[in-house]
Amino acid sequence: MKKSNRELKMMARNALRGNYTIPIIANILISALSMAFGSLTTVLFPTNTTLSWIMSQIFSFAVSVILSLFTAGLIYMYLNISRGLPYSFSDLTRMFSRNPDRVLIVGFVLALINLLTTIPSLLVNYIYLNEEALNGSTEALLQALYLTFAVILLGLFLYMILTIPLSMSYYLLADQERLSAKEAMSLSFQLMRGNWWRYLKLQLSFIPLYILSVFTCYIALLWIIPYLGMAETFFYRELIDDLHLQQNSTDIPQIFRENNDYNSEA
């Protein structure tokens, strides 16, 4: 029987009780790296020329792919915490030495989808929201803002449609080191078939917490983000049907036993 979002979130809270410190630090580090690379992008490509804009997008794309290794490492940490297994801060860099090309390929695909779905809004912003195009006109500014907002919403919708089926790929790669990128993405599609709405509802259920974090000057996000990550982890574990397995069990979830490509590598 499938767990409700409330049950998954309760399991996440129980797993994180007494285990928040390292996940919080890990998330801070990833955010710091992302912001540092963002600042570096501004420094390297400071002008508003078309070439500079294109180069900044290429640089940001490459950074997103590299950061995927840290994301997969963080997910490995969450998996260990959820299963009551030993974990450490070094889990964050684990995927650098575990066939990192697998993670980089998935990161490349997800970053490409993100780029393709955000380019229209970036182009609208670049073309219309500049001093020359607006020419001091309030009407032109409002039209450009409406157009930008509409394009952003469309891009966000397309991004969700394209990435939700792939949302379990990093979990699969962190959980099963012998899976290739192609196998992980294929299994993710299989797992998410009929479950994408449950996943989206789980994500949306955290919006009130994000809104309330405003009243804490966003400090509460330090706990909310690991909470969401752990809830997603239990969602993944339910999909692969391993919530019933014992902590030290050597059993393999049925979905991995049924995957012929995976078994052929054993």
Image: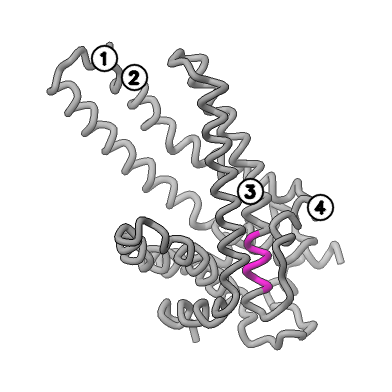
On the image, numbered disc 1 is attached to which residue?
133
Residue at point 38%, 25% (across, down): 123
Residue at point 56%, 42% (across, down): 34
Q: Circle 3 — which element? A: helix
Q: Quadrant of the C terminus?
A: bottom right
Does label 3 or label 4 sit earlier along the sequence? 3
From what the image shows, is residue 48 above or below residue 214?
A: above
Instruction: Check residue 97 in the rendering and tell me which mark sits there, or answer none.
Output: 4
On the image, numbered disc 2 is attached to which residue?
127
Residue at point 62%, 74% (across, down): 240
Does label 3 or label 2 sit earlier along the sequence? 3
Evaluate if marks 3 and 4 touch, with contact meaning CB atoms under 8 Å apart. Answer: no
Disc 4/disc 1 C-alpha distance (Å): 49 Å
Instruction: Check residue 68 in the rendering and tell me which mark sits there, or answer none.
Output: 3
Q: Is residue 75 magenta?
A: yes
Does label 4 or label 2 sit earlier along the sequence? 4
Mark 2 crowd level (few <14, some 14–19, many ≥20, 10 Å Cα)? some
Q: Circle 1 — which element? A: helix
